[in-house]
Each structure stands twice: as C-alpha cells, then as structure tokens.
Image (cartoon, rainbow, N blue to C red):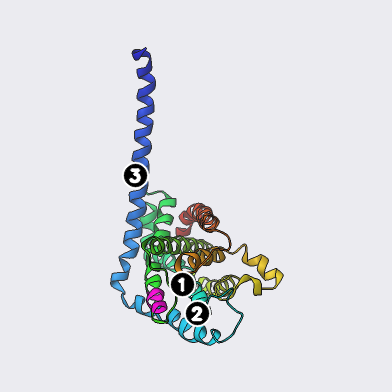
Amino acid sequence: MAMSDEPVARPASMVDRRFKEAFSGYVMQTWAIAAAEVQKLHHDPLELVTRAIQPVLWLLLFGEVMAQVRGVAPGRIPYIDFLAAGILAQSALFVAIFYGISAIWERDLGVLQRYLVSPAPRSALVLGKALSAGIRALSQALIVYVLAVLLGVGINLSPPNILGVGLVVIIGSALFSTLSLIIACIVKTRERFMGIGQVLTMPIFFASNAIYPLSLMPAWLNAVSHMNPLTYEVDALRALMLTHGTSDYGLVLDVGVLLGTSAILILIAGKMYGRMGY
C-alpha cells in the first residue's frame, strides 16, 4: 500500500510547492512595486504638507459652520464628529482619484515599458500601485486624526479600531486609485485625464454619506449613494473611528463591498494596463 500511495503523494506535494512558490513570488513582486511607489514621497516631502490643507479647511471652516445647524447629524452625535470620518474618506479619495496621472507620466518617460517587460504579472503591477496609494493615504488619516483630537471630536483611540481605520483607508484608496488607473488607460493624455478626474470627484463625494446622512437625501440620490463605494467606506470609518460610532450596513458588508469592487477593478485594470504602452 505504501508503494502505491507514493506516486500520488509526490505530484500533490509538487503542485503544493509550486503554488506556494508562485504565490510568494506574486506577493514579492506586488510589494516591490508598492515600495518603489511609496519611496517617491522621499523625493517630494512637500506633497504631504500640501495634502494637509484640504482636510484642515473642511473641518475648520465647513465643519464649524455646519455644526451650528441642528438636525444635520443623526442621533446625538455632534456634527463635527459625524463629519470627521467623511473628511478622512474624502481626503483619501481626492488623492487616489488622480493617481492615474502618474501612469501617464511613466509612459511618457519610458518607465512603463520597463514595467511591462518585467516578469511580474499585470495584476501584480496594478495591485502594487493600488497598495502604494493606500499606504500614502495613511498620511491623510494621521492628519485628520490629529486635527479631530484638537477639535474635541470623540475619537476611539483603541489599537484595534485604529488598525481597522487604517485597513479601510488602504482598501478604499486602492479601489479609487485603480479606478483612476483604468481612466488613465482609456484617455491616455494628461489633459483629458485631469478633466475627467475633476468631473468624477465631486459626484462621488456628494453622492455619499460623507457630509450628510442618507436620510436627508432625495430618493433618487439615496439610491445612487447605495451604489457608491465611498458610502460604504465612510460608514465603516464612522463605526471604527468614533467613540459612539455605528455602522448602518455592518462592517462585514462595508468591507465586503470595498474588497469585491477593488478585486473587480484590479482585474479590469490588469487587462488594460498592458495596452497603455502602445
């Protein structure tokens, strides 16, 4: 019996080993792309400073003014608390949605061609870029957290919640940066990309629960917001970030929508990314 089982066991172990080697190689290639993208911040640290301006303006100006209006935030949550999670998601969105322009620059400079001739799968290239966008967005989370604490927002500072916020920010930024990459693959010019990016950003932002609850929306906008991934990102951030935060949909559904949408976009971008060099 031992001799008859050996030929079966050996191919199975070989398949298992090859799968592990392929998976580890895929992860390493993805991380190499992500690390290379993140390192670009060392060449332009001023970028982190300029990114801080927008959330500061929204929280200090818009948030403080709207906090005087009663009935905007649901329940007994102060409006500035309600807004903080939305501004965090908005800040990450505004950075991620224009991430695709770097791919156009890379094509013009010849960097894209070097990526495409590498043995890394196209999906690993896209996933690496998406992951780097998520890591970059963590700087936005830090800025919003510090500002929110200074403004007296009831922030949940427990390590599991902070880790959860970081993961949601990374996934959400990866999603919208991949969408941005798809747009870059279609339009292929910086001028067209900037125009489309400007057109998309505001509808995505305002058709979500970032600055007002869904209950205040007209029926048609409420329906649109349920198809907007940013709505689920904000919902998850609000539940994890605030001391008395709750989720309208549940964290499982929020994260599931973000991961599922990201996976679909990465597959699409992986198919299109190779054609961008032509």
- Distance from the alpha carbon under mark 3 to that under mark 2: 44 Å
Return the x and y of residue 46 as percentages of the image width and height. Answer: 33, 78
Question: Mark 3 or 2, which is nearer the eye?
Answer: 2
- Residue 229: quarter of image: bottom right
Callout 2, which amino acid?
A: Ile
Q: Residue at x 46, y 85 (%)?
A: 60
Res. 109 image quadrant? bottom left
Q: Which residue is mark 3?
A: 24
Residue at the left extreme, as displayed: 42
Could you tell me what secondary structure mostly forms the magenta stretch? helix
The region drawn magenta spans 143-149
Relative depth, front residue between 256 and 187 = 256
Q: CA distance from mark 2 to mark 1?
A: 12 Å
Is residue 99 visible from the viewing direction of this image? no
Mark 3: which amino acid?
Ser
The kind of secondary structure element at disc 1 is helix
Q: Is residue 5 left or right of residue 58?
A: left
The residue beneath circle 1 is: 88
Q: Which residue is mark 2?
A: 80
Pointer 3 or 1: first along the chain: 3
As measured in the structure, the alpha-carbon distance from the residue carrying label 3 to the one carrying label 1 is 33 Å
